[in-house]
Image (tube, rainbow, N blue to C red):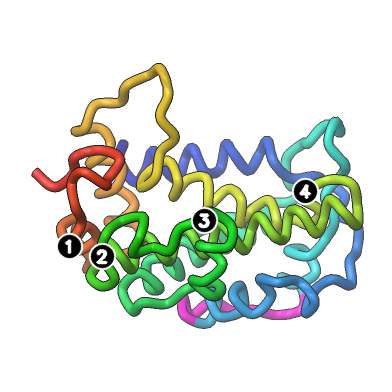
Amino acid sequence: MKPKKINDLLLLSLALVFVTCPQKSHANKNHPFYHDVKQAYQDSKLVYDSRIENILYSKLPKPGHELPKPRSAEEEQIMVQTIEALHRQFFKKVKTGGQYCSAEKIRIHFGQTPKERIGISSGGYYRLFVAYWTLNVKLEENRQNNISKHGYGNVYYIDGLLRFVETRLAGAFFPTPGPIQIPESSRRQGIQDLLDMYAPTMTINELYEGADPKKVRWPVLK
């Protein structure tokens, strides 16, 4: 899938995800991803101000509510640029060895350390594994916290945006096995499209540096 088509799908997805009348929230600095989001904007050299913050931390409706388009082109643009900035931040973490929370939480949540799961403790694939699964764990902790407080998982716009990014990354790098077999060439092209859009200086070989083919979900190492 080409980058232009990905952007078109991104805009279409947003049309289904966000509400027209956001409710003001005071979550902001208490949100576990607050500093990650600000840093993502900074790294992408995007303006981050109170107007953007108010939209990102506005409340979504409870499940079951109809979700129309954002109420303006400006709001839609904020959603798109946030998603793009979060993708770029993810690949920067992969490049530099960054993580969203302590890697120890991977062991706590899944019963294995990264090294026990993939057999290595350094290299590109190790950094990819840790970056993704610390994002996954931190998002799941946020979801559980939201459920305990509000009764549902995605409370704020930013929750939905982060989940959108995480789901997209999971599909590319850690897909759940299912009855439909996607050709290796299609998976490889999907990863290449993500790199072209958000990390043009990175390569697939760099991402999978050091990976044991037996421990990778599908053979991208050819």
Q: Which mark is residue 117?
A: none
From this viewpoint, is residue 73 visible? no
Mark 4 Cα-neighbour bin, 10 Å: few <14, some 14–19, many ≥20:
many
User: Between disc 3 and disc 1, whose residue precedes?
Assistant: 3
Q: Which mark is residue 111?
A: 3
Q: Nearer the viewer, mark 3 or mark 1?
A: 3
Residue picked out by circle 2: 120
Mark 1 Cα-neighbour bin, 10 Å: few <14, some 14–19, many ≥20:
some
Secondary structure, mark 4, is loop
User: Between disc 1 and disc 2, whose residue precedes?
Assistant: 2
Asked whether the beta carbons under mark 1 and mark 2 sit within 8 Å of each other, the answer is: yes
- Of residues 114 and 63, the one drawn nearer to the viewer in this rendering: 114
- Of residues 160 and 99, the one drawn nearer to the viewer in this rendering: 99
Name which quarter of the figure residue 7 lies in: top left
Q: Nearer the viewer, mark 1 or mark 4?
A: 1
- Residue 92 lies, in percent from the top left, at 38, 73
100 relative to 174, above or below: below
Could you give the CA–CA distance between mark 1 and mark 2, rounded to whole angstroms?
A: 7 Å
Residue 83 located left or right of residue 215: right
Q: Quick one: quadrant of the N terminus?
A: top left
Q: What kind of residue is marked 3?
A: Gly
Magenta stretch, residue numbers: 43-50
Q: Which mark is residue 210?
A: 1
- Residue 137 lies, in percent from the top left, at 58, 59
User: Between disc 3 and disc 2, whose residue precedes?
Assistant: 3
